[in-house]
Image (cartoon, coloured by chain):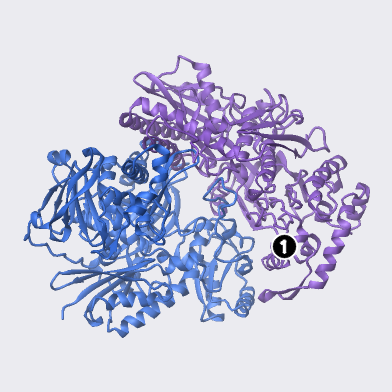
Chain colours: A purple, B blue
Amino acid sequence: MEKVFESKLDPVTFEVLKNSFINLVDQMSEQILRTCYSFVIYNRDFSSALCDAEGNTVMQGTQDIAVHVGTLHLTAKAVIEDFQDDIHPGDVFLVNDPYRGGTHFNDVRVIRPVFYEGRLIAFMQSNGHWSDMGGSVPGSFDVGAKDIYGEGVRIPPVRVWSKGEYLADTVNLLVSNMRVPEERLGDLRAQAEATKVAEEELMRLVRKYGIDTVLTAFEESQDYVERLTRARLKELPNGTFETVDYLDMDPERGDGLIPINVKMTIDDDKILYDLDGTHSTISCFLNASYGASLSGLYAGTKTFFPDIPLNSGFYRVIEAHLPEDTVVNAKWPAPVAGFCSGAYEKIMNACFELWSYVMPERALACSFNLEYLLIGGWDRRSHYDNFFMWYDWMAGGHGGRVDRDGANTMSPVFGAGLSVQPCEGQERLTPVITSKHEIITDSGGPGEYRGGCGVEKGGLLTNISDTVMSVCCDRSRSVTWGIYGGLPSIPHGNWLNPGTEKEQFLGAFFSNVKVKEGDTFTRPSAGGGGLGDPLKRSPEAVLEDVIDEYVSIERAKKDYGVVIKEIDADIDHYEIDEQKTVETREYIRRNRKKWLQTDIAEVQRLYDEGIIDRLDVLRQYGAIMDDATNKVLKTSTEQFRESLLKRSVAHWDS
Amino acid sequence: MSKHRVAVDVGGTFTDVFVFNEETKETFVGKTSSTPSNPENGVIHSVEATNIRGEDISILSHGTTVGTNALIERKLPKTALITTKGFRDVPEIRRGTKLDLWDAYKDVAPPYIKRRDRFEIDERIDYAGHVLKPVDEREVRKLAKKLKKRGVESIAVCLINAYVNGKNESVVKQILQEELPNVYVSASSEILPEIFEHERMSTTIINTVLGPTVGNYIQLLENKVEDMGYDGDLLVLHSGGGVMTSETVPRYASRIASSGIAAGAIASKHIAELCGFKNAIGLDMGGTSADISLMYEGNLRITTDWYIEYGYPIGFPSIEIMTIGAGGGSLAWVDEGGSLRNGPQSAGAEPGPACYGAGGLGPTNTDANFILGRLNETLLDGKMKLDREAALKSLQPICEQFGYDEYEAAHAVLQVAHANMSDALRLISVRRGYDPRDFALVAFGGAGALHSAYLAKEMDIPHVIIPANPGVGGALGCLLVDFRHDITQTFVANIKDVDVKEVEEKYINMEREAIALLEKEGIAHEHMHLIRHLEMRYGGQWRSLAITVDRPLRSLDDAIEKFHEEHKRAYAFSDPHKEVEIYGLRIEAIGTVPKPQFPKADRHGSVEKALKNYREVYFEEAGGFTRTPIYNRSDLPVDAEIRGPAIVEQLDATVVIPPEFIATVDEYKNMILSLADRRDTDGKSI
């Protein structure tokens, strides 16, 4: 084997220390999980890192949430930059500033410098999503905020312990601006203690192996990852790949998807991402700051190298051009709280698409969008009289794959470890009753390999007062797409009082909508996009899907051209009508390109007259509708159809 | 003829048996092949091989992999789920997480019950236990008819919020039993009334799919042991570390989803206590993996966070076992980045390590141990000869990569293996707030004693115990267990609002249930031990910690005090000013079985007579290959003392005593290894 890497240490010591670094970082994570107060952290929205004295990440946690990947070294460097020589043993710093390498305000990093014999040798960093950072809405996600001032407390690098002494006044200033401040103090304590546990573990390694050996291993852990990644890249052909994904809209401008252009070049042993051509900053929180977008590129890439450990060595292989004042590099004071549902997820999925062409054996169509709903108000049940927050995110479908369907009902790609909450716990804590939590039939994007199924979660508000609802999502218009000929899944978007006279479509991002006792709501999460031409899916696979009601008999015919007869549903007895299936598939093949060129006014007429339904509009006619008005959107449809031509139509034989 | 206690532990490849003669106090161990296609036959063969008649057996206990195999291979009866309208996909949605966060091509295993077999009824109970919508009897009868038509053999009933009020579930169960009298029905509120729908539903489903499977197996086995003349209860080990009678098994089938794995932990607890240690880490290392457990202050660590397949938790308390891919057959390799790795891939039983000469390419830990002279050229009393050329060849890629000779390479392979195992030991000890210096390491398994001294040194664990029969730890564990049940209940309240009488009352009700179970198993009241556990946390925290509380409970102040202490021990900090919350109650109900008093060995023989020969064995700390005495373990007398370097061989295990260690043999023939300098200062026992 060609020697990719040779350690200055003996191979055993190097391997042992590399594993010890992983171990100590994971130890930090485990402790946080067991002692935190924010349920968002408890459900695994956190990350941890060991950084070297320059702030470079030596090792990131193996269970870290994707959305923090590759941002922790930036915040460590921000502390170094601001405090320089004024960093001492026993100090602890906080940072959450999205313009200094942070992601959004809720992701609060606790950073502890580690010294050996008076010399700064490392930083231990624990990053967790605090449930509330103040600002105009509970949970700190305000789609109406036109700048960061509505999003809560911005924390540039700030010292909160000085030489071991807790700076209560500083911390008090911060948490006094947040809802439920005592919980935030609990999180701070849990995170600070976790970094201390990690510090002690590092000191053990220093005592055992000596300071020089440990510092060499810091450097070499990064070199090792860098060279491993470069060796993998060299095996791949050079080339440039390009795609565009979209945010739904700028709410101030209306109809029109917001493009994020991603161009990737593999150049020998490095990767260049160029996001030139991306839309300028928009008027709501779906923008991402520099660090967050970088993280999207790292995480999207890492998905295709699942076994390579994460540290600055990996990040050194990737160069990125993120044009300023765009939705992927928002500048102060543009709002960014919803970046995770916005630009971040688009960058990640665009990377999936580009890498699917480089490594077809790991291909992955688009997955559903991160969605979370926040209801905040007063709980007036008997024996309760307190402010409550019902803060919920959805599972959904992941994209179809090259030889198998997408995974059903998974956590979002922004954090595959994020765990959805049990409704029994939520019902105890809040006056919200879950009415359903179930798979949506026909939600998986049609394809030779179907996208995974999405989920619908509905609820009823019981004894409440002064309560508002907010949602942070996207892709009600830039619908989760298929690749290699696959089709889109279903739009995201939330409904208030569905099926009643008061039914109202609230969209996929909104905030501060007043709700009252007796109101109901429901929200679908999208399925994954399909992979491959749905007309090539095996009829037997469609039949199995029909039996499990992943797919309806109606859409089996419309999406897959497979005609299925129900014989006796009680005992799962259904039959494929072979003859009609051949005919239907032929019919679809002859017409489907034409459907996608149908004039928008004509699509509107067909829909208004009940000749085609909502999914036909999307999947057969490639048209985007506003569910609030039931109107087909001209610009969005044109943009969406252009993507469909490249991702789907171009891969159909006919 | 005297009476015998017989314990049988069925593994994937071998079935181990451990016999204790109640009169002569003699013990006997045996190994036979397992018979996965008819697992009951393997048990019978192993008992027959002992030549003990059924009527001479006083207690027959056993650990089985029937449940594990049925789950993994999805060889399950046709099972249906009935749940609340809107919730049939809970077992598929789970918590949405996956084990491998980054690999989009590694999926969570599919649910045990397909969507087509999951049904809903229109009923609802709220968080406080109020029936918002009662069960519509006609709807359930109609569904029962449909299930009959579908040929369903087993039904799980799990309704939302049934943990606070099981009324709707009992109504459903009642109707099903009327309509489908021969179908197995398991209701969540009866087996595990705990909050969180996915975890409770998953436990109920596993109970339901295993109920008929393990029920049939136990029935078959019971018939066969009766034919042999055994008329006592057939005792089955469950993951909580106790036994239950075959009659109770169908009700708590999910508790034997992993029956045998707890046995090794129980054995290590017993051996450690026999040697005078209250704190011990158990290491059971075989061919492909190592199981690690921890006992603190005489109690094995318990977890409620475990599963056979990721995503499908079993909520019953279980002995915490950490399994890592480190065994004799674990492969060492050089990764693309040029780093030396060890495991988790294993050469398995086929083809096995390179030195087995069956085509394995290696190098494995076994190959490295062989090349360094630690393993003899022939194993199993000469039945197996190892292939030196193959082992040397297997190390070549590592030699080439790092410029080593074969011996340096073999040494490096083992060092990496030791580091990986130490990391796992650190996870279960240091990470949980335990100081390894207060522990003994008990090494079981064919490979445990080859590595244990080095692990102890790395971890600062002062003493290593090698049991007399390290290869049959599981069977020993099965022999030693008590009856055990865990009754749990969710109960969430701020402790300052709680009336201690209310808690006491709840405990008493739970104890009543526990006592009934033990009575049914024929346990006399004087042998019943009920231990109360209280789950607590700081108000606002998400995880709880369990502490034991008094019986009867007169005040909660001690509990609060204990909670702060435990929080400090586990997480290095506590917060006495914060409000504390109760989260759940648990009764640990134990029906003790008089333990066999193992015979003390007599002191005849001498170390000199046990010396077989000398061999060159590689010890880096002694400067490389060293002329090393090789002893025969069975000939070593009580109180024998051996200074390392030395190797002690027995039929199915090899003990490595490195240069800085001293080994002694105790009166139960356990070997205790201690660092020579440590031993001089603090003596043998703690």
Q: Nearer the viewer, residue B568 or B507?
A: B568
Q: Is residue B563 above or below residue A268?
A: below
- Give the chain letter at badge 1: A
Q: Nearer the viewer, residue A26 or B564?
A: A26
Q: Which residue is mark 1?
A: A551
The quadrant the C terminus of chain A occupies is: bottom right
What amino acid type is highlighted by mark number 1?
Val
Q: Is residue B500 above or below residue A38?
A: below
Query: Residue B118: x, y in percent?
Result: 61, 67
Residue B68 picture quarter: bottom left
Q: Is residue A440 left or right of residue B357?
A: right
Residue at image coords 78%, 34%: A250
Q: Is residue B555 left or right of residue A490?
A: left
Residue at image coords 29%, 52%: B370
Which element type, helix, strand or loop, lies under badge 1? loop
Residue at image coords 57%, 76%: B152
Q: Is residue B508 above or below residue A94?
A: below
Query: Residue A29: x, y in percent?
Result: 46, 39
Q: Is residue A242 left or right of residue B534?
A: right
Query: Residue A38: x, y in percent?
Result: 52, 39
Residue sticking out furthest to the top = A85
Q: Nearer the viewer, residue A199 or A161?
A: A199
Q: How many marks?
A: 1
Q: Say if residue A334 shows up in the picture.
A: yes
